[in-house]
Image (cartoon, helix red, strand yellow):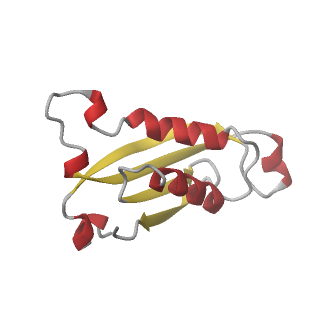
Amino acid sequence: MHSLLTNPTLMDCRRLFLRNYEVWINIGVHDFEKKGEQRVLINVDLYVPLALSTPQRDQLHEVLDYDFIRRSIAARVSQGHIHLQETLADDVLKLMLAHPQVRAARVSTEKPDVYPDCEAVGCEVFGLKEPQ
């Protein structure tokens, strides 16, 4: 798979990421899925311009705080039942792109416990802000 970093508009960016963030949420369209929580793994890549993410004094306020990613996901999943992983991924992507420092983002969701004969089922979305 190609990285978003091959896009010329992102060549001046740093990639921040959150890997396999595990959440237990109510997700799914089937009746049995609506009766309890399922384990979902969420992965996020954020592309932030180096000019906005290169610390000069080694201080947290000089960069995008990883807590923003986790808080945003936690807020979204706390809103109640979600039918589709696509909806969850799209919603998280919108939250990530709303941050003023983020130029582009990639979000994937995986349900690792759905089928016994595969590692996971999931989806992935990309977003890139229009140049300003």
Report x, y in % for residue 51.
20, 50
Choose top left, top right, bottom left or bottom right for residue 80.
Answer: top right
Left/right of residue 45 with respect to residue 8 in the rendered view: right
Q: Could you tell me if residue 117 is visible in this image?
A: no
Q: Is residue 104 above or below residue 39?
A: below
Q: Residue at x 61, y 47 (%)?
A: 113
Left/right of residue 76 with respect to residue 60 in the rendered view: right
Q: Residue at x 58, y 60 (%)?
A: 90
Name the foreground residue: 16 vs 100: 100
Q: Residue at x 51, y 56 (%)?
A: 93
> Extreme front residue here?
132
Q: Could you tell me if residue 126 is visible in this image?
A: yes
Report x, y in % for residue 23.
58, 38
Report x, y in % for residue 128.
40, 66
- What is the quadrant of the C terminus in the image? bottom left
> Extreme right residue here?
31
Q: Is residue 59 above or below residue 112?
A: above
Q: How many marks?
A: 0
Choose top left, top right, bottom left or bottom right for residue 47.
Answer: bottom left
Report x, y in % for residue 92.
55, 52
Left/right of residue 107 with respect to residue 62 in the rendered view: right
